[in-house]
Image (tube, helix red, strand yellow):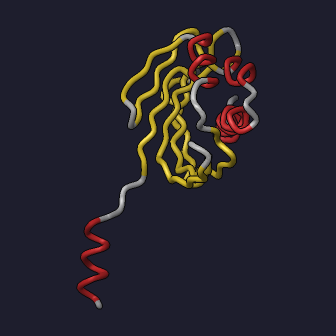
Amino acid sequence: MTTQADIMALERRFWQSMVEMDVDTAISLLDEQSTVAGVRGIRRFAPGEYKAMALAGDARMTSFEFSDESVLFPTPDVAIASYKAKQSFTMGGRHHDMVVYDTTTWVRKQGRWVACAHTETPEQDDPTAAAQSTAAA
């Protein structure tokens, strides 16, 4: 039986492949058709198209850390991983840190788990917290 730890290990393996620029490992974890939704819109791609995206541009992830992990199993062959990720990356020669809230849908096909959908939402400053902080001062 697949556990939350098993799915999160796959998720970490995918993210570590981005840190190491190990595109072949990343591709091995993707379904024949995958999709991602984030701040740059919605993209649908096959593994070869993912490879082209991963190698294009100058943005490179340098580290990541997960917290608040949760995995739902709506059926035995579908897992939805949700977590908070702190990521560090370089872009344009500059270092950046970012916190995001992510979900990845994993599907078991022919005995192996593959990622088929991913969403990423950047953490937003909470305007109510800022207002409360200002009011308390």
State which quadrant residue 26 falls in. Answer: top right
Instruction: Point out residue 17 in the picture as x, y percentages from the top left corner.
Output: 72, 32
Residue drawn at (59%, 51%), measured in percent from left and top? 94
Q: Position of residue 109 (x, y in %)?
A: 63, 12
The residue closer to the viewer here, 109 or 26, is 26
The answer to which image quadrant residue 57 occupies is top right
Residue 36 is left or right of residue 10, and the answer is: left
Q: How many marks?
A: 0
Residue 60: x percent and y percent? 64, 39
Quarter of the image for the C terminus: give it.
bottom left
**Rendered location of residue 42, percent (x, y):** 38, 24
Question: What residue do we see at 59% from left, 14% from top?
Answer: 31
Q: Nearer the viewer, residue 96 or 104?
A: 96
Q: Name, please, the residue furthest toward the bottom.
A: 137
Position of the N terminus by quadrant: top right
Residue 34 in the image: above or below residue 83? above
Residue at image position (67%, 32%) is 14
Q: What residue is at 42 percent from the left and 53 percent from the top?
A: 123
Figure check: 48 above or below 77: above
